[in-house]
Image: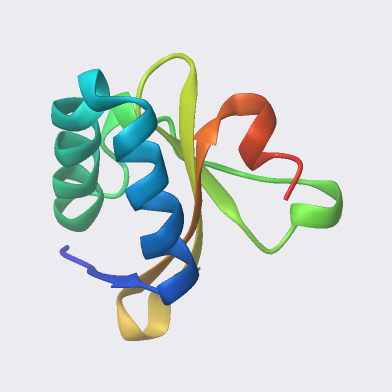
Amino acid sequence: MSYTLIFTDSYKKRAKRFAWQYPELKEHYRKTLLLLAQNLYYPSLRLHPLKGKLTALHSVSINISYRITLEMITTEKEIILVNLGSHDEVYQT
């Protein structure tokens, strides 16, 4: 099942900053987005729901240290990208 990725303006701004700060992660990030759109449940993404103040969101891994938080609208097969960054950065949103 494929999904449409929705890039909000605030996410685009964060992604631009992330790419500038971590150019070495460009390929990992690109691969993560491709996997996310093609197969949300691919094992390396480590998709999991969040708790607490982020309870409406899910998280996937770019690598062991960096994450993307997202909102899934499964009825429309859309994924709204919310934030990306280090483990601590994205969970303090």
Q: Residue at x 69, y 64 (%)?
A: 56
Image height of 71 relative to 48, above or below: below
Q: From the top left corner, tell me how far across and down residue 26 is, in percent.
A: 19, 31
Image height of 60 relative to 2, above or below: above
Q: Residue at x 39, y 39 (%)?
A: 18
Residue 73 in view (yes/no): no
| Horizontal side of residue 30 vs 6, given as left or right | left
Q: Residue furthest right?
A: 52
Residue sitting nearer the eye, 23 or 61: 23
| Horizontal side of residue 85 vs 57, given as left or right | left
Quadrant position of the N terminus in the picture: bottom left
Q: Residue at x 68, y 27 (%)?
A: 88
Q: From the top left corner, tell me how far across and down residue 79 is, in percent.
A: 37, 68
Q: From the top left corner, tell me how far across and down residue 48 is, in percent.
A: 55, 40
Image height of 81 relative to 25, above or below: below
* Colour theme: rainbow
Residue sitting nearer the eye, 44 or 81: 81
Q: Quadrant of residue 8?
A: bottom left
| Horizontal side of residue 21 vs 48, given as left or right | left
